[in-house]
Structure formats: structure tokens, C-alpha cells
Image (tube, rainbow, N blue to C red):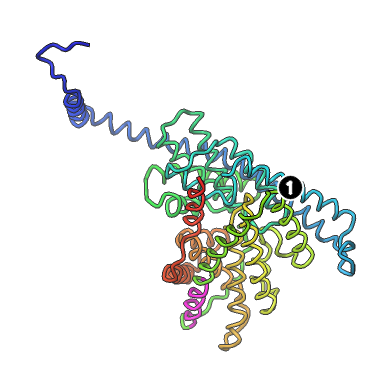
Amino acid sequence: MRYPADIPRDTEKVQMSYKSRKLKRINTNNMPGAIRALGNLKYRIILEGIMVGLLVGVVISLFRYSLSQLDVLRNLIVGLTDAESGSPLAWFSEHQWIGFVLLGVFAFLVSYFVYKEPYISGSGIPQIKGELMGKIHTNWLRVLLLKFFGGIMAIGSGLALGREGPSIQLGGMVGKGFSRFSGRLKSEERMLISAGSGAGLAAAFGAPLAGVVFVLEELRKDFDPKVLLSTMAAAVTSEYVASFIFGLDPVFTVFALSKPTLNDYWMILILGVLLGAIGVLYNKAIALSQDLQGKIKPAWLKALIACIMVVVMAKLYPECLGSGHSLVEETGFGLYSAEAIVLLLAVRFIYSVYSFGTGAPGGIFLPLLVLGALAGGAFTSVVSPLVGLPIGNEAFYVVLGMAGLFAAIVRAPLTGIILISEMTGTLSSLLPLSLVALVSYLTAEVLGGEPVYDQLLERILSKR
């Protein structure tokens, strides 16, 4: 195209001139229209969040229901063990051998799924963080399908893994799929991934507020009003869907919390320090387990070892199989002696670290909460008699242990406080929860531990 001599040919200047005139028109003549457009954008963001929340609520509810049915089947099979059998081959009944064949099938299918799509490995939260940072790009449909079925088989088989990480990744992939179908821009797609992730946590644990805070505090690490609106809409909607199916009861049975006096808060400080140290140890153990199991080749051999571990645990410590949900309530109700809790804490710690190191699709939220509950129960069971305090407040320290260990491992103390409050159905212990979370967080920082999801994301990116 030819320009007349009197028309400037500097394209950049032309564009700048055009932009300045356009900005001037917006600022002076079209201000009411701009305000209306901004308002319409907020309505659209909320509406999209509701739609994503509906989809996520259905997907996660189906995921939770499938896991609950596999838990029933696994517990039935494990309960058929003949404790009087002498020979290892006679440990199990005919029905149990069928169950262990099914376990082997699950293990090899999960290995194949992870081989086909490596981004379904582990909890899925680091992968979502990578997506939001623009460092990871996944096929949302493939991840959604393989994570769904792989997570059901891995968690349902008895590995010490949780449903929350897969639920967050599944929710994020639903949000990404919704964005692709509706043709949204990349920035809006990330907002919908965030909304879906928060909705996944809300539906998994019955904790909509924790889902919103987790997105802002851990996944995004900033405060964006648009993300807040869309995530709130999605989290509330998905939790409504899940509550319609599973009921309104909190995830953990409400404990009768017998809180100590202010003069006894020194125990909370000591517990926070111990939890901070345990959190750093846990994160380092996770990294070591991944390093060691990463050297096991081929993949079928790792799957075989995992099957053997599940069978051994089913025989020796069946209560440690799976996510360990029942251990929290049983410890809170004071059903274990001090010696039993300490032993369960040690066994569960090792088994949880091993399970996550396999790379199977499963999270560490619930397993680490179980460890925190056992640590809190063991602490009060051992310390209270030594200092002359009455026994019977295990439930209070179980709740503190969960919040403190979450803050130490994940480094998201606000999420931990809100999550535990919603999961236990009580908001009456915010002061001690805040104190133990703060102390454990600071202890982990002083000891130089790295937040677990940052650590896992770095590992994923280093292998690309």
C-alpha cells in the first residue's frame, strides 16, 4: 500500500495516536458504557463460576461415591483374614485371593495410565499451579478421564492417598474444558481453572470457604477480585451439589472439644514446634521416597512392590490402609492408648511417604491431616499425665494437630485453619488453631523446609 507524502509512515506513532484518541473517548464520552461493561463482566464471571461449579460438583460427587464403594469392598475383603492361620499362604481366604488379583489389575492399570499421561501422577495440585503459571500445558480431557479412573483405583486399592488433590486437579480440568468449549481467552481460562480447582476442594471436603482461600493463598498467591468472585460462585455451587448427595454433616464427626485454659497454652506452643519439625521431615521424606522409587525399573516391578505393600499392611495394620479417615475420629474419641497412637503415627508416616512416592494418582491432604491428628493425640496422651493435666481432651489436640501439620507442610496456614474448622463443623477454636498454625509455620521456615507443592512442582519441571 502506498502512502501520500503528507501521511506519516511511522506505524508505531500512528498506533500510539490512535490509542490515545481511543483512550480519550473512553475517558470522556463513554464512561457510563464502560461502567456498564464492567458490571456485566462481573455478572458473567459469577454465572460462569456457577456453571463450572455445577459440573465440578457432579464429577467430584461421582468420584467420592466410587471411592466410598471401593472402601466398603476393601474393608470387607480385609475383614475376612483368618488371624489364626500359620502359613503365609493360609493368611487369606478364597475371597481375599480374588480381591488381591483385582488389586494387581488396578496396580498395572494405574501404571499404564501414568505412563500414557505423566501429569496425572501424584496429587495434581503442582500440575494445576504449573498451569496457572503458564509452565505446564495439559490435554484437559485426557487428564480428566485418566485421573478420575486412576485415582479411584489407586486410592481404593489401599494406598495411603487422599481424594482432595485429585479433586482439585479434576475441578481444574473441568474449568479448562469449559473454557475451551466456550472459546475464552487464556487469561479467562486460567480464572476458570482456578474456580474449578476451588470447587473441587469444596466438593471433596465440604469446605467451600477453604476452597476459595486455598486458590488465593496457595494456587494463585495473590488477590484478584475476579478470581474471588468466580471461585466463590463455583465453590458454593459444587458444595451444594455434593451436600445434596452426601448430606450436610461435616467430614469428621463433631468432637466435644474440652479446651484448656489460657494458662495451659504453653502446650500449644510446644505442639506447634513439634509439628513444624515433623512437617519438614515429612517433606524431605517425600522427596527421598520419590528419588528411591524413581530408580525402580520397569514400571510393572514398582506396581508389584506396591501390591505387596498393600497386602502386608492389610495383614499387619489394616487400620492404616486408605486415606485413614476413621483414624482421626477414633483418636479424637480417645479409643487408643498412648503407646498405640505413637505406633500408629510411626507406621502411618512411613506408609504415607511410601504411597506418595509411588507416583500413583492420589493426594496428601487427607493423609497429612491424619498424621496431624495422630501427632496431636500422641502429644496430649504422653504429655498431659506428665504435667498433671486431666486426660480426655484428645479431640482438641487432634484438631490442633491437623491444622498445625497442614501449615507446616503446605505453608498455607489460613487455608489450614479454615479447612479444619469446616471439616469438623466448629468455629469455636480459632485462637488456638491460629496459634498452633503460626508456630508450626514459623518453625518449618526456620528449619529451612520447602513447601511441599513448590517442591513437587520443581521436580515436575526439572524432568521436562
195 or 284, nearer to the observer: 284
395 or 218, nearer to the observer: 218
x, y percent for residue 204? 59, 50
Instruction: Identify residue for label 1.
Output: 106
The magenta segment is: 264-275
Assess whether residue 274 is covered by the magenta stretch. Answer: yes
Locate residue 41: give its quadrant: top left
Image point (89%, 69%), residue name: 86
Q: Secondary structure at mark 1?
A: helix
x, y percent for residue 30? 23, 28
Quadrant (top left, top right, bottom left, bottom right) of the N terminus? top left
As drawn, is 212 to the left or to the right of 203? left
287 or 52, nearer to the observer: 287
Image point (47%, 55%), residue name: 454
Q: Is residue 213 above or below residue 262?
A: above
Q: Can residue 29 be seen?
A: no
What secondary structure predominates along the stretch shown in magenta?
helix
Image point (59%, 42%), residue name: 57
Q: Amino acid at mark 1?
A: Phe
Assess whether residue 267 is covered by the magenta stretch. Answer: yes
Locate residue 72: give its quadrant: bottom right
x, y percent for residue 347? 67, 69
Q: Callout 1 environment at 10 Å: few (<14), some (14 to 19), or many (20+)?
A: many
Image point (77%, 55%), residue name: 74
As drawn, is 252 to the left or to the right of 31? right
